[in-house]
Amino acid sequence: MLDSNGWLTLASVYLHEGKEDEAEKGLIRAVSKSQTVDESQSSAGALVRFYRSKFRFAEALTALRGLSKNYPETEKSRAEEIFLQTVLQPETGLAEWVAWSDKPEWMQVWGQAMNDGIRTGDETMRWMAFGRAYGAAGQWDLAEYCLAKTVEITPDYAEAYGLLAEARQQQGKDGRPDIEKALQISPKSTVVRLLSAIFYRRQHAYTTAVGLLQENIDNEPDNPIWFQEMGQTLAEAGRLEEAEMYYQKAIDLTPTEVSRYLSAIKFHLQYEYRIDEAALPLALQAAALEPDRADTQDALGQVYFALGDLTKADAAFSTACQKDGRYVPVWLHIGQSAIARNNFAQAKDALLKVISMDKESTEGRVAARLLKQYFAIGDGGSESPD
């Protein structure tokens, strides 16, 4: 007889072979055969993902709530329940969102965007707002569902097709027909051209992406967004010298906008390009412009860390914590700096703090990897057995 893991494996084989009915039955058996918390979470999670991939959101919600009845609710599971409930019954789901008194900031932002959609009073704009909100929260299947509803109601809505292409692309699906439709409907729209450029950039079709962004720059030469996006596109294409020029142009157009500096700093750090000559002056300027922001101080610390000046890096990270102790990235950087200094006690504390604050974020995943690598601590934050 197969155990829970065996049924999961069999269901995976069925899915690969396109036997969806058999796969569903296998997943249900996996759930019923679960003996431990890990098995239950793994099998129920797989069943929820299966239902969500088919837009069978009511069944996904039922499966998720079945798991919640037997095991402690997590921030992730509560958020997912609200996401699913809201796409099925917006008012009910958002009432649950309101009742969540200690919800994280990103969940607060999502709910506000969903409420804004409801208040529009227009069905097309409501589904559009829902799609945007779900996409911003990383719930790309729900975003796809909402945006498909949008273009179903208003089939000449070019921007909605552009966002639908992104939602599908983010899931590994083919969004090309949607992006081509968007460009066909509104080839002169700067928003559509931007969405198309981002789509083609992810496809590594850099020439096409650059051409679309250049059209936007020609039409709106004072818009820093086009220059920043061009910088990222050229960087991904390996044209770093040109990329730097476009990032700098974005800064020149809005010299008091800190986000432009932070984007340029990120570029220099990511590509390890002219950190001393360019990234450091930018980081110092950003910190001077907005000294009370944690992200500017953290960016300065990252630059010093990249330059090997751990003393100045730690000072900047400490200042960032003083400005906002809930800013998750800085705790990861503190952990990484502590590892570099062989201060493993401090590193462990900082990395565990990242996990406790935002396990599902990029920083949380990196922290989990470092905890496992250096301290044999598993994903749940507990010591792994020898």
Image (cartoon, rainbow, N blue to C red):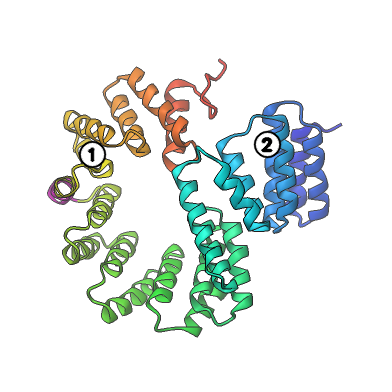
**Residue 45: x and y, percent?**
67, 41
The residue furthest top is 386
Residue 87, image quadrant:
bottom right
Ranked by sequence position, the earlier of labels 2 and 1 is: 2
User: What is the distance, in whole Å, between disc 2 and disc 1 at their CAs?
Assistant: 38 Å
Relative to 120, 273 lies left or right = left
**Percent of width and height locating residue 310:** 20, 30
Residue at 55% over, 74% down: 178
Residue pointed to by mark 2: 42
Q: Residue at position x 69%, y 28% from top?
A: 37
> Which of 311 and 286 lies nearest the eye of the viewer?
286
Residue 51 percent across, percent down from the top left: 72, 52
User: Is 309 situated above or below 282?
Assistant: above
Residue 184 or 111: which is nearer the viewer? 111
111 within the magenta span: no
Q: Is residue 189 above or below residue 131?
A: below
Tag 1 residue: 306
Principal secondary structure, stretch drawn in magenta: helix
Q: Amino acid at mark 1?
A: Ala
Q: Is residue 257 above or below residue 377?
A: below
Amino acid type assigned to the residue bearing label 2 in the image: Ser
Q: Determine the secondary structure under disc 2.
A: helix
- The N terminus, quarter of image: top right
Q: Residue placed at 35% from the left, 24% from the top?
A: 347
Is there any visible trace of residue 174 in the rendered image?
A: no
Is the Cβ of the residue at disc 2 closer than 8 Å to that at disc 1? no
Q: Residue at x 36, y 34 (%)?
A: 332
Q: Which span is picked out in magenta?
A: 274-282
Q: Which quadrant holds the C terminus? A: top right
Q: Please give left or right for residue 295 compared with residue 81 in the image.
A: left
